[in-house]
């Protein structure tokens, strides 16, 4: 099943890194976070990727163009008849990666609309290029098929960033400084979508998928939420990048299911 990954945003809150590269190429454990996301999908058998590029998309293209060169042992014969031989193999050899230039200013809905031109199947997968989780992709897919809606998102409980208060009138009855998880669910990405989603996308590049399209889907009962209570972490800030890096380096990376 095809996997669309939105890779075109500016990543302004992670300017320490994104001044030089797009956010999906910010490293975790020496590999771009995009690679970790793709490894997760490939673990569940989904190895056909469509990357929607925008800001500094050439960096992503260069990464995959030189993938064998950068991940293999190599012998080069120089001279008039040059030859390059790669001695190593890797699990990613059966990946198919389509990279689409979807525009620097294009919003998420506009990027998705352009990706649909390369999808003929009844349904496909969609996610963002900056979030990791240990969710079971195929369980979400089964949930989607069972409910028959146009769209299913993975609902997650984010790690708490602020102190959580329990209030009674104007008094505080309980306080937890930065709880491990917040009580409410948010959109964690990891969508399953039917091609019918095209009917909900505006034709302009300014279409933001998370606004009118998802709101209309919800009003019509065509948006379902598959709740995931396990690990999920986005990478919006340098602190969050360092958090993921520390998890990887200490061997405590819950998203590493492969």
Image (cartoon, rainbow, N blue to C red):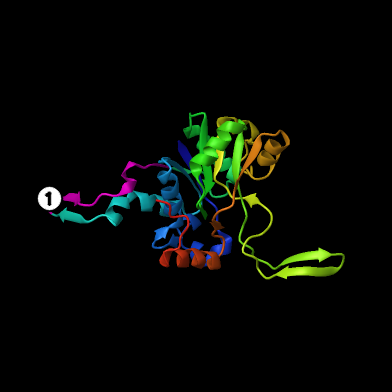
Disc 1 element: loop
Q: Nearer the viewer, residue 182 or 242?
A: 182
Q: Is residue 97 visible?
A: yes
Residue 103, visible in the rendered structure:
no
* Residue on which the image places disc 1: 80
In percent of width and height, residue 42 lies at 41, 44
Dividing the picture into quadrants, the one containing residue 14 is: bottom right
Foreground: 67 or 95? Answer: 95
Numbered label tally: 1
Label 1, residues with CA under 10 Å away: few <14, some 14-19, many ≥20: few
Give the image location of residue 96, x and y in percent: 37, 40
Q: Which residues are magenta?
A: 79-98
Residue 89 % position (x, y)? 26, 49
Q: Quadrant of the N terminus?
A: top left
The residue under the point 41% across, 49% down is 39
Please say whether residue 89 is one of the residues in the magenta stretch.
Answer: yes
Instruction: Give the quarter of the image for residue 230.
Output: bottom right
């Amino acid at each position: 099943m095809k996997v669309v990954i939105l890779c075109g945003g500016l990543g302004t809150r992670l300017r320490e890194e994104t001044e030089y590269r797009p956010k999906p190429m910010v490293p975790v454990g020496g590999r771009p976070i995009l690679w970790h996301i793709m490894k997760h999908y490939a673990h569940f058998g989904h190895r056909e990727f469509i990357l929607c590029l925008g800001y500094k998309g050439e960096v992503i293209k260069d990464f995959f163009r030189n993938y064998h060169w950068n991940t293999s042992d190599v012998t080069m014969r120089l001279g008039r008849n040059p030859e390059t031989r790669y001695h190593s193999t890797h699990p990613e050899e059966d990946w198919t990666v389509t990279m689409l230039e979807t525009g620097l200013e294009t919003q998420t809905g506009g990027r998705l609309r352009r990706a649909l031109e390369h999808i003929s199947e009844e349904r496909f997968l969609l996610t963002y290029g900056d979030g990791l989780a240990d969710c079971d992709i195929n369980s979400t897919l089964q949930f989607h098929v069972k409910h028959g809606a146009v769209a299913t998102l993975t609902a997650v409980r984010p790690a708490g960033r602020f102190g959580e208060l329990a209030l009674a009138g104007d008094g505080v009855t309980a306080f937890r400084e930065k709880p491990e998880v917040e009580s409410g669910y948010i959109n964690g990405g990891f969508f399953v979508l039917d091609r019918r989603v095209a009917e909900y996308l505006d034709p302009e590049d300014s279409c933001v998928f998370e606004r009118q399209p998802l709101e209309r889907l919800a009003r019509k009962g065509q948006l379902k939420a598959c709740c995931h209570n396990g690990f999920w972490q986005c990478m919006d800030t340098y602190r969050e990048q360092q958090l993921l890096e520390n998890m990887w380096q200490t061997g405590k990376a819950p998203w590493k299911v492969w």
